[in-house]
Image (cartoon, helix red, strand yellow):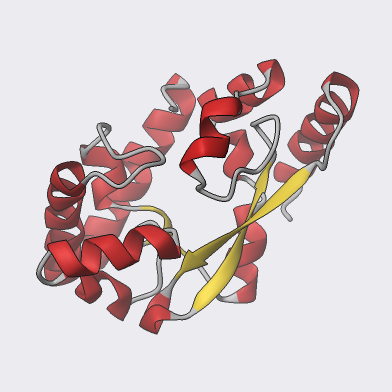
Amino acid sequence: ISFIAFPIYMIAVLFLKLSSSGPIFISQERVGENNKTFHLIKFRSWLFDDHGDQELHKKNSITPVGMVLRKTRIDELPQLINVFRGELSFIGPRPEVPKLIEVYEKELPYYKTRHLIKPGLSGWAQINDYDVPRGAPDVNKTKRKLSYDLYYLKRRSLLLDLKIVLKTLKTLLSRSGA
């Protein structure tokens, strides 16, 4: 954890503890490089972890502190631990929930291709397509997101990664998180 991130961590932990009961961090199962699963670490922004269950999700809601964490993308800061573990890179396709992958691999040709490289904290799809599926499977939205992932896979370069980093920083500074 960098010197810059540490104070942000401490403030987020304090506000999460003071504002609601429950864990500070959540661990979400995701699929990464070569279809290996790993646990993505995030600050808790919802009342509870519904594990992608649609019925539980209907009863869940974002906490007030969670809303700020998500808007500023601070909820994703603990994923730096996943980067240090080698499960994530800074740039690449975002890792997906295993249940959703089962659907998308059946419905979308070449979906498995996105798992040939390590997933990333940010990626070409994240900076170009803000209308991504949230929660339930959505084949049409994921088809569009997949086109961005495949574009990135085909054209990966230091210059493209730099462009993604700069646009990601712009997004972070403008606090336009979802």
**Residue 40 position by quadrant:** bottom right
Q: In the shown orientation, is residue 56 left or right of residue 119?
A: right
Closer to the camera in the image, 87 or 99: 99
Q: Could you tell me which residue is drawn at 18 percent across and 42 percent down?
A: 141
- Where residue 104 appears, as percent x and y from the top left, is 23, 61
Rendered view: 175 above or below 123? above
Residue 156 showing in the rendered view: no
Rendered view: 77 above or below 121? above
Q: Could you tell me which residue is drawn at 61 percent across and 24 percent down?
A: 62
Rendered view: 128 above or below 30? above
**Residue 50 position by quadrant:** top right
- Where residue 25 appears, as percent x and y from the top left, is 75, 47
Rendered view: 62 above or below 6? above
**Residue 168 position by quadrant:** top left
Q: Could you tell me which residue is drawn at 13 percent across and 67 percent down?
A: 155
- Where residue 105 appears, as percent x and y from the top left, is 22, 69
Q: In the shown orientation, is residue 1 left or right of residue 132?
A: right
Closer to the camera in the image, 98 or 71: 98
Q: Could you tell me which residue is drawn at 57 percent across and 72 percent down?
A: 38
Looking at the rendering, in which quadrant would you find the N terminus?
Answer: bottom right
Residue 171 showing in the rendered view: yes
